[in-house]
Image (spheres, grey):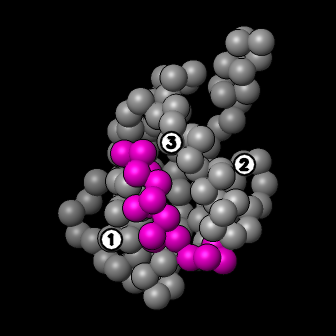
């Protein structure tokens, strides 16, 4: 990850470090109550929906390998590889908008295909 971090990047990194460490209570302190999250499964509105989306994924996470992160005062992007129980190499990216120290919009990008295949193979 880059060492030069602006405001949005600092918020995203703190949030990322918390949820990838399975500390959802801390992770949620960086999330606005009215967050909008665009994920491969569709749009999620509000902090409760966001947590219900992210927390189950954090539970199957076995590791994470950050590749790069970039940001300015309002926007941050992180690219990483998640290692999970069902899928050992799952590349992902997230672009967030930060307003007043909280993430107000999150765009998760990842390929659901390997996760769907793992679910089908488990029955």
Q: Which residue is mark 1?
A: 10
Residue range of the region highlighted in magenta in the rendering: 19-35
Q: Are marks 1 and 2 in contact (CB under 8 Å)?
A: no
Say whether residue 56 is left or right of residue 99: right
Kindly indicate the quadrant of the structure image that contains residue 83.
top left
Mark linked to residue 40: 2
- Crowding near the residue tagged with mark 1, few <14, some 14–19, many ≥20 C-alpha atoms within 10 Å: some
Question: Which quadrant of the rendered structure holds the C terminus?
Answer: top right
Marks 2/3: CA–CA distance = 16 Å
Residue 68: percent from left, percent from top: 36, 52
**Residue at 66% over, 63% down:** 48
Question: Which quadrant of the rendered structure holds the N terminus?
Answer: bottom left
Residue 108: percent from left, percent from top: 61, 54
Local SS, label 1:
helix
**Residue at 67% over, 19% down:** 118
Mark linked to residue 58: 3
- Crowding near the residue tagged with mark 2, few <14, some 14–19, many ≥20 C-alpha atoms within 10 Å: few
Image height check: is 81 above or below 86?
below
């Amino acid at each position: 990850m880059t060492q030069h971090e602006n405001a949005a990047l600092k918020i995203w990194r703190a949030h990322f470090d918390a949820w990838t460490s399975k500390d959802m209570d801390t992770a949620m302190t960086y999330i606005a109550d009215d967050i909008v999250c665009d994920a491969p499964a569709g749009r999620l509105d509000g902090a409760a929906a966001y947590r219900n989306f992210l927390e189950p994924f954090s539970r199957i996470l076995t590791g994470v390998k950050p590749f790069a992160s970039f940001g300015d005062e309002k926007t941050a992007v992180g690219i990483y590889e998640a290692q999970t129980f069902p899928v050992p190499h799952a590349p992902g990216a997230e672009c967030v908008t930060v307003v007043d120290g909280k993430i107000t919009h999150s765009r998760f990008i990842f390929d659901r295909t390997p996760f769907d295949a793992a679910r089908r193979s488990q029955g």
